[in-house]
Amino acid sequence: MTEREGVARLTRVATPTASSGLMPPPRPAARPGAAPGGGVPPVSGRGLGPPTGVAKLTPKAAAVEAAARSLRQAMGRFATGVTVVTTIDRNTIHGMTANAFLSVSLRPPLVLVSLGRCRMSEMLPRTRRYGVSVLSHDQAHFAAHFAAQRASAVEPTFEWHDGLPLLEGALAHLACRVVDVHAAGDHVLWIGEVEHLYHRDGEPLLFYTGRFGSLRALPDD
């Protein structure tokens, strides 16, 4: 697929390093016989080189993957809203669909987005700002668009706050400045202080068991 502004590209990126703005993962304690600096000690005999890094415990790896799928299926029963997270870097708008978004604190006003390996995680160490647009039920086409599932027939347009793009027509906008970053397993938690807020009434877009849907009207009681 060709590059286009505003469309999420879920490409794999290198593990974050100190130069990317994230703290590097802690080094494991040195084991007896380890090479200086924590490297892999040379392997002697028969001219063998150092380990290649390819997993040897295939059954265990398969079990880990099965557990991850089960967790995804279980967490899929937790219905959430849908957001588009946006930033701008070098005059290019980038957006991605995310439901791993939550409120952290009211005083000060803090929110959090949890991102795996994606282009957004590459850009935020540079931009240090992100926008969150909470989608309405009639914006499912934008949810698919920014998840790189299928391009929207309607070109997304943006409102701007202090140079930060926010998806037009959303139920709520939050413009955030990154104030803390935490590595958590295979994801990174980006905590942002809210600098701008907007909201309106409307029916939200929901995500449940891998599908987008709308909220049915609830009884008055």
Image (cartoon, helix red, strand yellow):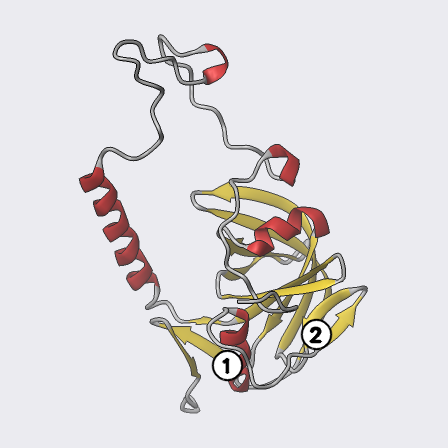
User: Which is in the foreground here, disc 2 or disc 1?
Assistant: 1
Compare residues 66 and 104 and report the one nearer the observer.
66
The type of residue carrying mark 2 is Tyr
The type of residue carrying mark 1 is Ala
**Dot 1, how many residues are within 10 Å of its Cα: few (below 14), some (14-19), or many (20+)?**
many
Q: Residue at x 28, y 57 (%)?
A: 69
Circle nearer the N terminus (2, 1): 1
Q: Residue at x 67, y 50 (%)?
A: 178
Q: Position of residue 90 (x, y in %)?
A: 75, 57
Image check: 105 left or right of 74?
A: right
Q: Is residue 17 above or below residue 108?
A: above
Q: Residue at x 49, y 28 (%)?
A: 26
Q: Which mark is residue 140?
A: 1
Image check: 149 left or right of 211?
A: right
**Dot 2, how many residues are within 10 Å of its Cα: few (below 14), some (14-19), or many (20+)?**
few
Give the secondary structure at mark 2.
strand
Task: Report the residue marked by disc 2.
Answer: 198
Image check: 67 left or right of 1?
A: left
- Report which quarter residue 213 is drawn in: bottom left
Quadrant of the drawing holding the C terminus? bottom left
Q: Is residue 147 above or below residue 67?
A: below
Compare residues 149 and 179 and report the one nearer the observer.
149
Q: Is residue 82 above or below residue 220?
A: above
Whole-angstrom CA distance, mark 2 to mark 1, is: 20 Å
Please identify the residue farthest to the left as the structure is shown.
59
Q: Which mark is residue 176?
A: none
Q: Position of residue 155 (x, y in %)?
A: 64, 82
